[in-house]
Image (tube, rainbow, N blue to C red):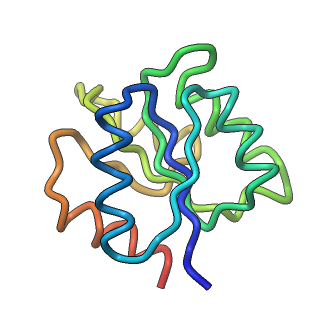
Amino acid sequence: MSKRVLVVEDQEDNRQILRDLLASVGYEMIEAHDGEGALVAARTQNPDLILMDIQLPVLDGYEATRRIKAQPDLRHIPIVVVTSYALSGDEEKARAAGCNAYVAKPYSARKLLETINRYLT
């Protein structure tokens, strides 16, 4: 059974890049377009890992992460921030919210896959 990755990203072009990348290594991609959708998808789709953007409509990635990690049945899901919002202190803020790893855009596809595989294998 392939691993399921929830991609929380509001930009279609970024989702397409991740869709192609994840499919190339056999992962199934679930999509959410905002932080509120991430909460619903995490609960209903049972992903093995979440790739979370920070700048999202409705509910930002920090708050979505905090809410997911506050749920006892969801807190085991690794969350990797993938964001262009990469100012000084942002990685620490993401980790404080509960993220397991932080990848800044633009990213190397190889490095992103290494990070994903670290949590899925």
Q: Quadrant of residue 104?
A: top left
Depth check, front residue: 108 or 26: 26
In the picture provided, is 98 more to the left or to the right than 36? left
Left/right placement of residue 14 relative to residue 99 reads left
The location of residue 71, given as percent across then percent down, is 83, 48
Compared across the picture, whether 22 is left or right of 72 comes to left
Q: Is residue 105 above or below residue 69?
A: above
**In the image, residue 93 lies at what x, y percent?**
44, 33
Between 41 and 16, the one nearer to me in the picture: 16
User: Which of the 4 image quarters holds residue 105?
Assistant: top left
Q: Residue at x 61, y 28 (%)?
A: 35
Q: With 65 as the anchor, is 101 left or right in this view?
A: left
Q: Residue at x 29, y 61 (%)?
A: 21
Instruction: Return the x and y of residue 17 as percentages of the image width and height.
Output: 28, 47
Query: Residue at the location (68% across, 31% down)?
Result: 37
For this orientation, the residue located farthest to the right is 72
Tell me the quarter of the image containing the N terminus: bottom right
Residue positioned 32% across, 35% down in the render:
83
Residue 121 drawn at (x, y percent): 47, 85
